[in-house]
Image (cartoon, rainbow, N blue to C red):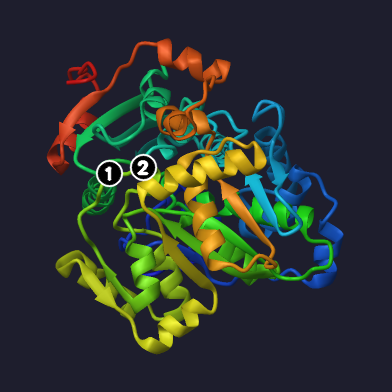
Amino acid sequence: MLYSSTRGKDNNKNFVQVMLNGLAKDGGLYVPNNIPKISKRKLHELKNLSYVDLAYEVTKDFVVSKDITKEEYKLILKKTYNKKFGEEIISIDKLNNNEFILNLFHGPTFAFKDYALQLLGNLYDYILKKKKLNLTIIGATSGDTGSAAIYGCSKSKKINMFILFPKNKVSEIQRKQMTTFSAANVTNVSVRGNFDDCQKLVKDLFNKNTKSMEYNFAAINSINWVRILGQIIYYFWSYFKVEKNMIPINYVVPTGNFGNVYAGFISKRMGLPIKKLIVCSNKNDILTRFLSNGVMEKKLTRQSLSPSMDIQVSSNFERLIYHFLKNSKKVSNLINKMDKKGKYSVSKKLLTEILKEFSGGSISDNKTKKSIKRIYEEFNIVTDPHTAVGYSVGKSLLKNDEKRVYLSTAHFSKFFDTVSNSLKIRLVYPKKMKKILEKKESFLTISNEIDEIKKVIDDKTSQIYAFPE
């Protein structure tokens, strides 16, 4: 399997090159040159496999190469999805015959990002040892990516990691999962700005580094193809659990950076019978607006009760646009317009094609709280705000008889106050979370300036700021 950039100037790279580079050298995102197809007959053969064996079957064509053999990849997957991942790898709650919640919070940091980042960490560890390389990982997080990356990737001593998060714009437990993690090779950095600022700093660092090649940089954000790869697996797993007759069903996905829902799109391209992918947003509704009028327009990011979706630049959407346009020059022109003018638009024809695959909706904070309460009252299930956004949007866009899976992306305790205030009941933190809240924090605070983050990377002995500043 070879991969090429969405912007056309960094092409035909193998899997390991793509994984280690993260972002393409031309600033684009890597996509596979072709997507492997799984026949209906093969789907029937896959439906009773364990999570690990299913993971191998649906992702092997993307990974196996001269650098990683079939046997080696199987071992990496077994190491990733064993009991250390969580007491229960993954689970589904059946609400009724047509509605299911896919629980993706069983991993070490209680969020869906563990599924991909534990895999990425083990792949890194294997390749870095084999090739005798060191890596500097840069990541931006709107909440869950940071801790999942730290818990997944920092175990390799050949990695030096810097995680950027927006100051005062992630929940307390999300922040403390990162800032209480004690490892010499991890530096947490609070940025005075929003998630989009953090994400832009990461991209700017990559672009600057491409010219000087000062560091062996890698990305752990969903711009890294392995992030998409690790998420494809649970679309297949959940489909086989809820649909026995190979009839297309819908997936309802709360999303900010478009990585999770894009993994569903790739699953569909591979042959998984998916009807519609429902894109769910909060008041930061850039994706919903695009799906209504074909205009991708950046507005001011607003703080919400579902902070992981407080995003105005959805990086992975570039991959989707490339899939439909199949023209890297046109993609580059659109991204340049976004960078310079804060918006771009696509033709009605292209929007019509996209709408065959996707629907979108957004809800307010008030409706989010009502949705948390409704799920609890009707099903006795406590959900986090992002899952509640998905549930509410899914209910509004789909008919009752349309089968769907709601992706539950995080454990409610990551947003304890919001959920507690919505339900007006006494909730209890899981033991692991409670311990984290009691630990001492350590991180740096910087302005939204590339020179400041570069200085942090150049000099890890910078002063540590106590929280709050």
Task: Name the spot of residue 1 as percent of width and height, x first.
Answer: 60, 64
Residue 345 is tagged as none
For the C terminus, the quadrant is top left
Q: Nearer the viewer, residue 242 or 20?
A: 242
Location of residue 327 by image quarter: bottom left
Inspect the image, locate mark 1, and give the three-letter code of the amino acid beneath it: Gln
Q: Nearer the viewer, residue 215 or 29?
A: 29
At x 51%, y 55%, the residue is 392
Task: Name the spot of residue 61 as percent of width and height, x first.
Answer: 67, 60
Task: Name the spot of residue 253 as percent of width and height, x first.
Answer: 53, 56
Q: Taking 407 as reference, is 44 left or right?
A: right
Contact check, label 2 and label 1, Cβ < 8 Å: yes
Q: Nearer the viewer, residue 8 or 204?
A: 204
Location of residue 430 by image quarter: top right
Label 2 neighbour load within 10 Å: few <14, some 14-19, many 20+: many
Residue 303 is tagged as 1
At x 37%, y 55%, the residue is 23
Inspect the image, locate mark 2, and give the three-letter code of the amino acid beneath it: Pro
Label 1 neighbour load within 10 Å: few <14, some 14-19, many 20+: some
Is 297 situated above or below 333? Answer: above
Is 460 situated above or below 66? Answer: above
**Which residue carries the number 2 mark?**
307
